[in-house]
Image (spheres, helix red, strand yellow):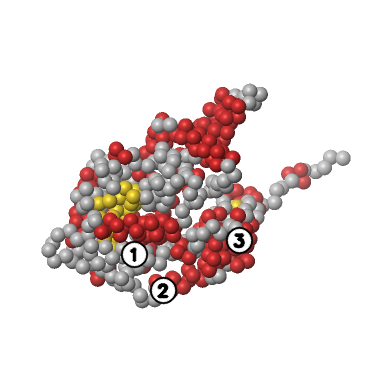
Amino acid sequence: MPATALDCDHRRHGHRKIPTERFSGEIINGDCIQMYDGLPIATNKMPIEERKSIPHHLLGGIPLRERPWQVATFRQNAVKVVEEIHSRGNLPILVGGTHYYIQSLLFRDAILGGVTQDLVSEQPLEHTWPILKASKEEMLEELRKVDPVMAARWHPNDQRKIKRSLEIYLTTGKRASDIYDQQQKQRTGGHLRQLESTFQKGTSGEENHNATFNTNSPLLFDTLIFWTHVDSNILNPRLDARVDAMISNGLISEVQSMFSYLREMESEGQEVDQTSGIWAAIGYKQFLPYILASQATDTDSDNVIDTNKLEKLRQEGIERIRIETRQCARGQIKWIRNVLLRTLEEDHLDKTLYLLNATDSCVHLCTDHSVSHDVAGIFLRGDTLPPPREISNVAEQLLVAKQKGDFYARYCNFCNKTLMTETQWTGHVKSKKHLNAVTPRKDWRSFYPRIP
């Protein structure tokens, strides 16, 4: 297959590192929230004036009234866009974003947390199987009956994964756990190919965007991956500053407009799933308590809320956005190290992932920008790529896949808490909170003689 590049930039904390203009690149958005119309501030869509006339695809354009996309929908549309870009002789550059969307486009037979997205039907399923509209507790109970292995794998609060596992069983008649095991055996059964045999070197020495990739490769396209990394001590303040900028640029007014539009759709009898699509964007639901309180004050003179309470709700919304933004960035980093890098190593494709250090925007940015130029040029010419871990000391430290752990839910009755790994469970049972919960309370009065 023709060549494709991927830039993993966590919450757009760094500048674009792939030399787009030099290699006639076109951007494909890989963030599932940025694909929808609405909330340009909350979703941090790149403004048109900053795109430098570079074509951007799948960035906005999905109407708010359209049913939210599933991963299979994204993959189908993204593959079509990639093929169109290749037909123009240009380089597709996937930027983002949402890890399970990215992985679905990277691998032919994507295993996404034990779930094969291609098996999920694109038709509305809730009318056929009402259980899919039930609460997460009811869906988990049903999943325990039909696929106890997957039920034990997910946290009880992870409604999205619970529902997806249940959908796979209902639509295919096969348990997601069985599909996962079968694909794992295929991946380790000797069907993988070495990366060195995948490149066709161009005879003219010119950049070759159409280098054919081994059709037996696990990768869907001949892909080069850049991980734009920032140290957490620097990243967190940058993310906080980004949230402050969003507030200054009118995020609250944007959320108010979206909430009014939601009320309009509901008044028309249109059911809106606020757990997916644009409605799941960080920055929307966090401000809803403030928006509701503000509107109640405006419409009901007898229900006036104290100004200090309104400001408290506003500040709580800002803080929740900051926390969830940092959590999202950490989740992306964990996916790269725990899933993407490990999968590439298992398939002998780890030489396709390069780390670009954007911690110091004044020093490493310039250095690593030239690195991305050089590596991208070598990749497109089909020459031998330099070892990714030898690019920098940071790359040597971080481009090591973490050992795969077994995930299964264990519930502590004493503390009313669910733990997902053996390490978490061991740490919990040794914690002061747990020990206090399991130790019977002493009645100190029994140590003293009773006075008649």
Toward the right, the furthest residue is 452
Give the number of the mark in front: 1 or 3.
3
Q: Give the CA distance from mark 1 to mark 3.
A: 33 Å
> Mark 3 highlights which residue?
129
Whether residue 391 is visible to the viewer of this picture, yes or no, is no
Q: Residue at x 23, y 62 (%)?
A: 210
> Mark 1 highlights which residue?
220
Sequence-wise, the earlier of marks 1 and 3 is: 3
Circles 1 and 2, Cβ within 8 Å, touching? The answer is no
Q: Is residue 255 left or right of residue 157?
A: left
Residue 46 or residue 236, whichever sits in front: 46
Residue 240 or residue 377, whichever sits in front: 377
Q: Give the CA distance from mark 2 to mark 3.
A: 31 Å
Q: Position of residue 363 (x, y in %)?
A: 23, 42
Q: On the rendered image, what quadrant is the N terminus found in?
A: bottom left
Give the number of the mark in front: 1 or 2.
1
Q: Position of residue 259 (x, y in %)?
A: 53, 37
Q: Residue at x 58, y 26 (%)?
A: 298
Type of amino acid at the residue the image marks with label 1: Leu
Sequence-wise, the earlier of marks 1 and 2 is: 2
Q: Position of residue 124 (x, y in %)?
A: 54, 57
Q: Residue at x 57, y 65 (%)?
A: 170
Q: How many numbered badges does the structure rendering display?
A: 3
Whether residue 307 is visible to the viewer of this picture, yes or no, is yes
Q: Helix, strand, or loop for circle 2?
A: helix
> Mark 2 highlights which residue?
186
Type of amino acid at the residue the image marks with label 3: Trp
Q: In the rendered image of this protein, does residue 345 appear above or below residue 275?
A: below
Type of amino acid at the residue the image marks with label 2: Gln
